Image (cartoon, rainbow, N blue to C red):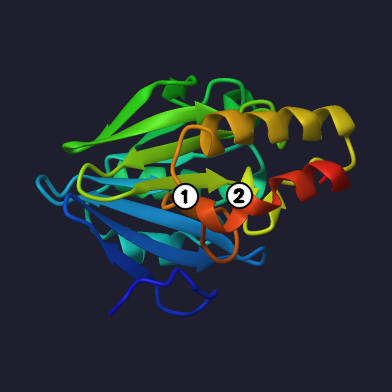
Amino acid sequence: MTYHGAVKVGGPPDVRELAHLIITKVAVGPYDNNAYLLRCRATDEQLLIDAAADAPVLLETVGDDLATVVTTHRHHDHWGALAEVVATTGARTAAGEHDAEGIDVPTELRLADGDRLRVGQVELTVRHLVGHTPGAIVLVYDDPQGHPHVFTGDCLFPGGVGNTWGDAAAFESLYRDVNEKIFDALPDEAWVYPGHGNDTTLGAERPHLQEWRERGW
């Protein structure tokens, strides 16, 4: 079946099979958080993006082996199940270097802009975006046999950038980083996997960038 990314809490995950990577998306918790399990086809090594809210669901999705859990940013709804997932699987923890102190579970691998993170033979690029939180990160997989795949946490959604709670400076920072590090760097075909809700593409969102700037959120 064709991947669509429209998952609901309590419903089944959606699975996208790429040439080198399998992506499983599942929705959990009262805030409809998305968690993404990435599995390298060549090695079966797995990486989880955001251990949010519901450890039993995440552990069922993960199965027996998990190498790394990446937390996209410090907000509790994105790491509420992190302690239990790590205790059960022994996975190492990773997060942006400027958000690590805001996460109750110790961060073993502190990530900076431009860092490379591997899951098996697959390489992800870290992008640091400031505004939603000081240390939020986005992970980019540039599929050599397809288009890029961008895991944006709460920095980019269908219809706009992440919440900056009316802080004009934070909005300007996030808007600038999203433009320079995501829209200017990647093609329209790039697929966006956000921290909540449905997926989108950069092509679907690009025509609205000026609208976002003008409205200030």
Please indicate whether residue 155 sits to the left or right of residue 18 in the image.
right
Decide which of 188, 45 is in the foreground and name it.
188
Q: CA distance from mark 2 to mark 1?
A: 8 Å
Q: Against 154, is 184 above or below?
A: above
Please indicate whether residue 154 sits to the left or right of residue 144 in the image.
right
Q: Do the numbered discs 2 and 1 sit on residues whose CB atoms are within 8 Å?
A: yes
Please indicate whether residue 170 sits to the left or right of residue 71 in the image.
right
Q: Which residue is at a point 33% across and 49% down the rendered structure image? A: 147
The image quadrant that residue 98 belongs to is top right
Kindly tell me whether residue 133 is visible in this rendering.
Answer: no
User: Measured from the top left, where is residue 177 in percent x and y?
Assistant: 63, 29
**Residues packed near mark 2 inside 10 Å, few (<14), some (14 to 19) or many (20 plus):** some
The residue positioned farthest toward the left in the image shown: 42
- Residue for badge 1: 188
User: Measured from the top left, where is residue 135 in percent x and y?
Assistant: 62, 27
What mark, if any, has residue 206 been given in the picture? Answer: 2
Q: Against 25, is 181 above or below?
A: above
As shown in the figure, which amino acid type bears the numbered disc 2?
A: Arg
